[in-house]
Image (tube, rainbow, N blue to C red):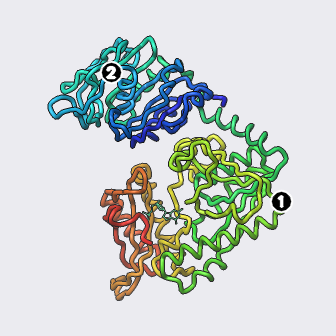
Amino acid sequence: MFHQTVIILDFGGQYNQLIARRVREQGVYCVVKPYTTPAARLRAMDPIGIIFTGGPNSVYLPESPHPDPEIFRLGVPILGICYGCQLLAHHLGGKVVPATADSAREYGKTETEFSTDCRLFRGLPGKSVTWMSHGDYMEQVPEGFRLCARSAACPNVAIADETRGLYGVQFHPEVNHTEQGAAMLRNFLYEICGAKGDWTMEDYKNTAIRQVREQVGDGRVLLALSGGVDSSVAAALLAEAVGPQLTCVFVDHGLMRLNEGDEVEEAFSRWDLNFVRANAEDLFLARLAGVTEPEAKRKIIGGEFIRVFEAEAKKIGRVDYLAQGTIYPDVIESGAGDAAVIKSHHNVGGLPDCVDFKEIIEPLRMLFKDEVRQLGRELGLPEYLVSRQPFPGPGLAIRCIGEVTRDKLDRLRLADFVFRDEIARAGLEGSMDQYFAVLTNLQSVGVQGDGRTYDCAVALRSVTTSDFMTADWTRIPYEVLDRVSTRIVNEVPGVNRVLYDITSKPPATVEFE
Ligand code: XMP
């Protein structure tokens, strides 16, 4: 590893990925490891610091997760957050007990006072708001530690043994509600762990290119390019590293947004690589003819995708490496740590079974989504590709309710383009996580010019979400919705009504099918 590393030891807290992102935002590389990782393995990674995450347990209960006690003898600074703070107290001779209502159980925003002579809080205001979420209380602080933050309800909000570099905070510095949280993490990283800030995307790019070249040698690499952010950035990185040995197969199923296929092709024209665009629109439409059931549509598209990809792969002949755009959240969520993971929910899931290859290359498996976008910019990919919103594998087929036909797809593409165009003109792209148009199967009566119409309704969908498991509908300003509606009924043939979906997930899903 070429970078200084901070290890985030995962005790099951809900903000663990957020801690990792916050650390990386400070220019410091970090990895998330399960709490069961032996201290010897952690030492072998030569970390400059360790962060214990929060977690839903109580340290004094028999089933609760504990680290290898040798970890406290590594001589590496440790920051314990919430449950992690209580672990420090519990293991080093203090006492943690359940908080009673009148002592120190705290939830939510809490006015907190800090001792600014503690290195963790140096240079910060003496008072600020922290975000608390704990039901346990450090009744007795371990020997060698001092108290360095307090709230009205709790005298020991933070503890520190500065000589050993051990720090614990009951609150969550990683969430935005903790006003000085980022500055505290920065102090831990730079003042306490001696971070140099050597995690930059330019550096990552150069290192990753070198590593890919070493790994691949004169082998041949195959990548399924979907046009989404992850596979596009992976492709660009591989193109930069081993262009002529790389074949990107872009299966154009004809279910993409307006001009998307051409945009992807254009974006990769600057590299010397083997770019195969399999124009399979007719094939997909033929297979989808007459099919209206959403799951049936998905299955047909998934199966056909693999067949087309396989046929193209066979034309290439020998393949040594199959590249995938797996990113770090997939790796963490799989719980597999270092082990090789093949994304099961990948758009082209099942590919490894149908093509012979020696190894999988996943050049983005250490990166968060924001970092993947940054790397894409660093590699010179156009902004429209790098900042692209998520797009489902089955494409517009699941936004075209009922049977999928070329004519319906063309109308949907136009409506969707108008919606995205108006959102961009209003500068609202950053305030929503996914937004698109749907061609419903509702026909309704309208009046245009002097005549009665009996045409289709387009539904607009926009959601705000952090994980797509739950989502809220976006409060788009009425005047923007008004412009979108006016343009769609004027510019898209056969549409006389525009609806806005005001349902959250659950009970609805993001997509209509
Ligand atoms: P739902 O509709 O399940 O969507 O609330 C959640 C997120 O997943 C995307 N999605 C898919 N992505 N293949 C994909 O790659 C699929 O079959 C698929 N279905 C839904 C959806 O666009 C949203 O971001």
Give the camera-side residue of 225 and 326: 326
Task: Say which residue appears at 50% left-offset and 37% top-offset.
Answer: 36
Give the camera-side residue of 396 and 485: 396
- Element type at mark 2: loop
- Mark 2 or 1, closer to the camera: 2
**Amino acid type, residue under disc 1 in the picture:** Arg
Q: Are marks 2 and 1 in contact (CB under 8 Å)?
A: no
User: Does the image show residue 345?
Assistant: yes
Which residue has dot 2 on it? 94
Depicted 370 relative to depicted 286: above or below: above
Task: Say which residue appears at 60% left-offset and 70% top-offset.
Answer: 302
Residue at the limit of the structure toward the front, as seen here: 62
**How far separated are the C-alphas under marks 2 and 1?**
62 Å
Quadrant (top left/top right/bottom left/bottom right) for the C terminus: bottom left
Image quadrant in which you'd find residue 16: top left
Image quadrant in which you'd find residue 171: top left
Q: Is residue 342 left or right of residue 492?
A: right
**Amino acid type, residue under disc 2 in the picture:** Gly
Residue 410 % position (x, y): 54, 75
Residue 137 % position (x, y): 26, 29
Image quadrant in which you'd find residue 269: bottom right
Depicted 512 relative to depicted 87: above or below: below
Q: Is mark 2 within 8 Å of ligand 1?
A: no
Q: Is mark 1 within 8 Å of ligand 1?
A: no
Task: Say which residue appears at 35% left-offset and 24% top-offset.
Answer: 89
Residue 236 % position (x, y): 68, 48
Please tell me which of labels 2 and 1 falls first in the chain.
2
Which residue has dot 1 on it? 318
